Amino acid sequence: MSYRDIPSGQVLAWLKQNYEGKKVTDSRSDAGNWLEFTLEAISEGSTTLSLIVKKDMTNPYNNLHGGMMAAIIDEAIGWAVVSLDREQHYTSLSLNVDFLFAIKVGNRLMAKANVLRAGKKIVNVECQVYDEANNLLARGNSNLIATNMDFKKEG
């Protein structure tokens, strides 16, 4: 069973029980699955992901590519929104990223996302990404909107 099948009101508890501290391989997001992140912690409106920078995530300088950093931030933000355990589905209206410091292939990073405001239609979330020395690598924020889109069907 996947969290795609869990009724609203039970999602957060199910995620904590089945994913917290583990590598996520069956997310709703195929891009998220490709990242091969570990869901370190999740609570209502907050999530922490970690991952090792892979070679195919790097730019010509062997540092994490900016587009990959944006994808990591977007994924962490998405999980923070999922943790709200709402019936609505959300999609991004905006994603703003500040790149502050580089990280090399083979190093672990930690992305921490927190919901700042969860309105009826718009959710605002922030995310900070750190390396193992606690250097702030990047920060981002996003506005997401409730949508009537449904999740993709398998196959």
Image (cartoon, rainbow, N blue to C red):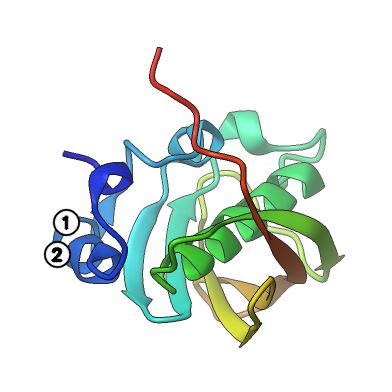
Above or below, comparing residue 25 to residue 125 in the picture: above
Q: Secondary structure at mark 2?
A: helix
Q: Amino acid at mark 1?
A: Asn
In percent of width and height, residue 67 lies at 78, 44
Disc 1 residue crowd, few under 14, some 14–19, many 20+, Cα 10 Å: few
The answer to which image quadrant residue 47 occupies is: bottom left
In percent of the image, x 44 and y 74: which residue is there? 84
* Cβ atoms at labels 1 and 2 below 8 Å apart: yes
In percent of width and height, residue 58 lies at 70, 37
52 relative to 120 in the view: left or right: left
The answer to which image quadrant residue 50 occupies is: bottom left
In percent of the image, x 16 and y 39: which residue is there? 1
Q: Which residue is mark 1?
A: 18
Q: Which residue is mark 2?
A: 17
Above or below, comparing residue 38 to residue 59 in the picture: below
In percent of the image, x 16 and y 56: which residue is there? 18
In percent of the image, x 52 and y 54: which residue is there? 107
**Residue furthest to the top:** 155
119 relative to 133 in the view: left or right: right
